[in-house]
Image (cartoon, helix red, strand yellow):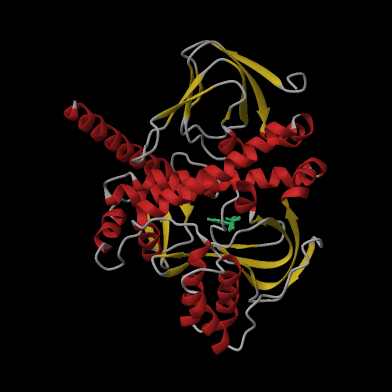
């Protein structure tokens, strides 16, 4: 494999990638030697650093999403690395399908663990992925009078938890809505699927064996958080979803509901690997989507570690600008598509009680509110503020550690 890709050798102590560095083009697969990862912001429960060895890879999220590096990696000994450019992922699949598959699989595991930590830290509730919870999701929809969704949820509860505690309640609900006890069977052998608006593709907590590639129409991805349904994304043709349950054998992490009549390809485990090999561009798209989501989840997590509320607002704005691939530089400006209240909500602050932080934000002459939308007139200043607040967190942490010794 090394013949078609570039190789690079590093001495012990060299920095191969540095957190925060932009325009990362390459990712690395370790052939020989050991390296250590480091992150500026750590959350409770996360390993401070990890040691990587032959067969491991790093730098994929940033190279494939075109965003800044999310970790620093230092060589611990002399090492040899395979350097893969972001546009060579297809080639990597052709030359070494197992490595490409390992990357895709590990990404979906990583994403789920990030998602769970974010939910745990920001909403302080445990994340439980268990078909038993299908009942609660269905009950929420029932109370909202969304009877098609509720019926789907109760039917799936009965299917996956036939001896569950709520079986008789679920049956009563279905009867009261005049719906059958069993959902219509989907012909799994047919990979072409059509869905009508408002139909469910799957519900949160339902075991799943397929991923979907949207060919036409739109799909909403929603999740229950603290008894409320939160919209995670609206997906369009070309988008892929449902890969997480397929890749790590866990129930669905969110629900998929049709927002506009849709046609899709449904890929199951058996034909997934075949598809990856036969259509490297699809797998490249999948890894790009996963990289994008991991990058965003990491930034959300590190935002939660910033103790100063104003620092969190600055950091959220910088993440939004970077997400849109806006060039950060002196006097570079960016018009955000959100207002002050949206920003407070994104950080999990209260619109009224925490409004003063918004006022503090707007005291900076390079921040402005125009027709209800936020504008930053100097992204480099914004970046400096974020760096200052992050530095403060890591210094406080060091001090705490020293005091504990
Ligand atoms: P899976 O867990 O199988 O089922 C729900 C799907 O929603 C999940 O796979 C992802 O494909 C998708 N998904 C989960 N979280 C997000 C998110 N934050 N943005 C977009 N899609 C998501």
- The image quarter containing residue 25 is top right
Quarter holding the C terminus is: top left
Q: Position of residue 62 (x, y in %)?
A: 56, 37
Up-down: is 389 above or below 36? below
Position of residue 360 in the picture relative to residue 129 (left or right): left
The residue lying furthest to the left in this view is 403
Up-down: is 352 above or below 94? below
Quarter holding the N terminus is: top right
Up-down: is 356 above or below 118? below
Position of residue 80 in the picture relative to residue 2 (left or right): left
Q: How many marks?
A: 0
Closer to the camera, 101 or 261? 101
Position of residue 191 in the picture relative to residue 148 (left or right): right
Q: Position of residue 144 (x, y in %)?
A: 48, 81
Q: Is residue 161 visible?
A: yes
Q: Position of residue 55 (x, y in %)?
A: 62, 24
Quadrant where ligand 1 appears: bottom right
Position of residue 306 in the picture relative to residue 106 (left or right): left
Residue depicted at 59% across the width and 70% down the height: 156
Up-down: is 34 above or below 165? above
Residue depicted at 46% across the width and 75% down the height: 140
Q: Position of residue 109 (x, y in %)?
A: 55, 44
Residue depicted at 51% across the width and 84% down the height: 145
């Amino acid at each position: 494999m090394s013949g078609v890709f570039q190789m690079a050798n590093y001495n012990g102590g060299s920095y191969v990638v540095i957190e925060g560095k932009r325009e990362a083009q390459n990712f690395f697969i370790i052939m020989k030697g050991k390296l250590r990862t480091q992150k500026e912001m750590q959350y409770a429960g996360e390993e401070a650093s990890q040691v990587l060895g032959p067969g491991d890879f790093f730098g994929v999220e940033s190279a494939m999403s075109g965003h800044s590096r999310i970790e620093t990696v230092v060589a611990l000994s002399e090492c040899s690395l395979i350097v893969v450019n972001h546009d060579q992922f297809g080639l990597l699949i052709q030359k070494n399908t197992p490595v490409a598959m390992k990357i895709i699989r590990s990404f979906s595991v990583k994403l789920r663990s990030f998602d769970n930590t974010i939910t745990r830290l920001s909403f302080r509730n445990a994340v439980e992925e268990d078909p038993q919870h299908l009942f609660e999701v269905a009950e929420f929809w029932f109370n909202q009078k969304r009877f098609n969704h509720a019926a789907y949820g109760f039917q799936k509860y009965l299917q996956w938890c036939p001896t569950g505690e709520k079986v008789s309640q679920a049956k009563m609900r279905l009867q009261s809505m005049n719906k059958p006890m069993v959902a219509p069977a989907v012909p799994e052998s047919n990979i072409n699927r059509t869905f009508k608006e408002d139909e469910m593709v799957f519900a949160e907590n339902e075991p799943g064996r397929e991923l979907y590639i949207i060919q036409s129409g739109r799909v909403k991805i929603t999740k229950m958080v603290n008894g409320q349904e939160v919209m995670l994304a609206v997906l369009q043709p070309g988008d892929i979803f449902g890969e997480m349950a397929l890749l790590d054998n866990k129930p669905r992490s969110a629900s998929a509901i049709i927002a506009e009549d849709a046609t899709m390809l449904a890929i199951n485990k058996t034909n997934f690997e075949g598809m990856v090999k036969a259509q490297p561009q699809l797998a490249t798209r999948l890894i790009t989507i996963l990289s994008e989501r991991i990058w965003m989840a990491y930034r959300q997590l590190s935002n939660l570690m910033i103790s100063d509320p104003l620092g969190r607002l600055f950091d959220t704005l910088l993440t939004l600008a970077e997400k849109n691939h806006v060039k950060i530089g002196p006097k570079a400006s960016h018009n955000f598509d959100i207002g002050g209240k949206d920003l407070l909500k994104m950080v999990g602050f209260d619109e009224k009680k925490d409004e003063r932080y918004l006022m503090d934000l707007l005291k900076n002459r390079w921040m402005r509110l125009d027709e209800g939308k936020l504008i930053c007139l100097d992204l480099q200043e914004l970046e400096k503020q974020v760096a200052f607040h992050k530095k403060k967190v890591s210094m406080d942490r060091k001090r705490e550690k020293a005091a504990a010794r």
